Amino acid sequence: MKQYIGTKIVKAEFVPGCEKAVGDNSLNENTPDGYKVIYSDGYESWSPKGVFEESYKECNNLTFGIALEMAKKGNKIARESWLPCQFVVYQKGYPSGIPCNKQTAEAWGMQEGELFRCAPYLQMQYSEGKDNSHFMWTPNTLDILAEDWTIVE
């Protein structure tokens, strides 16, 4: 059998045993501690405490690998120490090409409007001050090994 690992963001709250978690009549005084879970599509469920805590981690103090997977799903990510001034997003690039502007054409020796192909990349926004600059970003070893990554809302 193959092994699988999941990465998704859910909303959840701890529910002590014997409380109704999702209006499920099968929950009763013998129901163990668990979590009410709400998925991105609005679906609600209940998960036993141990199963939930083994499967999910709060959206802070993440490894770079988990943060990167979440960036690929469209989330903004950042190191805790960067907030609130900077964050990283995943750019899908332009594998089929996009017409290049004058500046890009001159930089690459192309004709303005010629298709410019670009592989996926990480982009950082640095928003301290007024300019909200964006630039391509490559993590360093400290960033990759850090466990202080968070999802930016």
Image: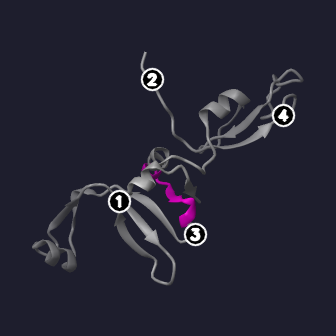
User: Real-space Cα distance between discs 4 and 3?
Assistant: 34 Å
Kind of element beneath mark 4: loop
The amino acid at mark 4 is Pro
User: Real-space Cα distance between discs 3 and 1?
Assistant: 19 Å
Front of the two marks 4 and 3: 3
The magenta stretch is 71-82
Q: Position of residue 71 (x, y in %)?
A: 45, 52
| Earlier-in-chain disc, 2 versus 1 | 2
The amino acid at mark 2 is Gln
| CA neighbours of label 2 inside 10 A, class few (<14), some (14 to 19), many (20+) | few
User: Real-space Cα distance between discs 1 and 4?
Assistant: 43 Å
| Earlier-in-chain disc, 2 versus 3 | 2
The amino acid at mark 3 is Pro
| Earlier-in-chain disc, 4 versus 3 | 4
Q: Quadrant of the N terminus?
A: top left
Label at residue 3: 2
Q: Choose between 130 and 60: the one closer to the eye.
A: 60
